Amino acid sequence: MGQHMVRIETSHERTENGYVAEKARYRAQRCDGCPLRCRCFRSKGNRIIEVNHRLAKYRKQAAERLTSEEGIKYRGKRCIEPEAVFGQMKYDMNYKRFRHFGMDKVKMDFAFFAIAFNIKKMCSKINKKGKGKPFGAANTACFCLLAVLTTLETAKNGILTKKSA
């Protein structure tokens, strides 16, 4: 119980974003007679674990900052209203990552998405007001504007793809 684990290798993995993560692999020396082996793992041989030390350090710093006196004060001031909007963007509309690199392209990407999101919200409010009535001029205008924005987004993606190729 409580065995010392030996570092066996260090690997570097590149994520989709281009970030290089360094992971260290450790192996236990003697798992055969350990009374906790059945709770620890089920494979044959000795247990191997993978640790990202940099990530562990960042998580520890974040936890310390969030639980500090100043962090608690800032969390109390944190506005709840935008959280729902970002939740809708991420989970309802499946917008979890920016499609482009570079601050100017990310700003443009987010601006297009925010405009489309607000138009969608406006159209749903108009639909609620005019329930049971045929499509009004305002509603038709919303759908036309949404179609234009969708076309612009498609064109923008095509132009950026041609530039990067």
Image (cartoon, rainbow, N blue to C red):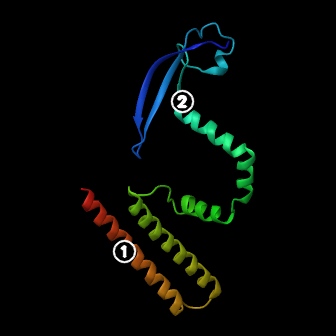
150 over 3 or under it: above or below? below
Foreground of the two, 113 or 21 = 21
Mark 2 or 1, nearer chain start: 2
Q: How many marks?
A: 2
What residue would you read off at disc 1? 151
Q: Amino acid at mark 2?
A: His
The 10 Å Cα crowd at callout 2, few under 14, some 14 to 19, many 20 or more, is: few
For marks 2 and 1, give the CA distance: 45 Å
Q: Look at 52% across and 63% down and name the residue there.
A: 93
Dot 2 corresponds to which residue? 53
**Residue pictured at 55% horizontal, 10% vertical:** 29
Whether residue 6 is situated above or below residue 122 in the rendered picture: above
> Which residue is located at x 36 percent, y 74 percent?
152
Three-letter code for the amino acid on which mark 1 is drawn: Thr
Q: Quadrant of residue 78?
A: bottom right
Give the left or right position of residue 79, taking residue 26 as reference. right
Q: Quadrant of the C terminus?
A: bottom left
- Residue 65: name its quadrant: top right
On screen, residue 49 above or below 28 = below
Residue 45 at x, y = what percent? 52, 13
* Disc marking residue 159: none
Residue at left offset 63%, top offset 21%: 40
Secondary structure at numbered mark 2 = helix
Assign the N terminus to one quadrant of the image.
top right
In x, y percent, where is residue 139?
Answer: 52, 87
| Image position, residue 38 (x, y; %) | 65, 18
Identify whether 153 is placed above or below 62: below
The image position of residue 149, as x and y in percent, is 41, 76
Of residue 42 and residue 48, the one placed in the foreground of this image is 48
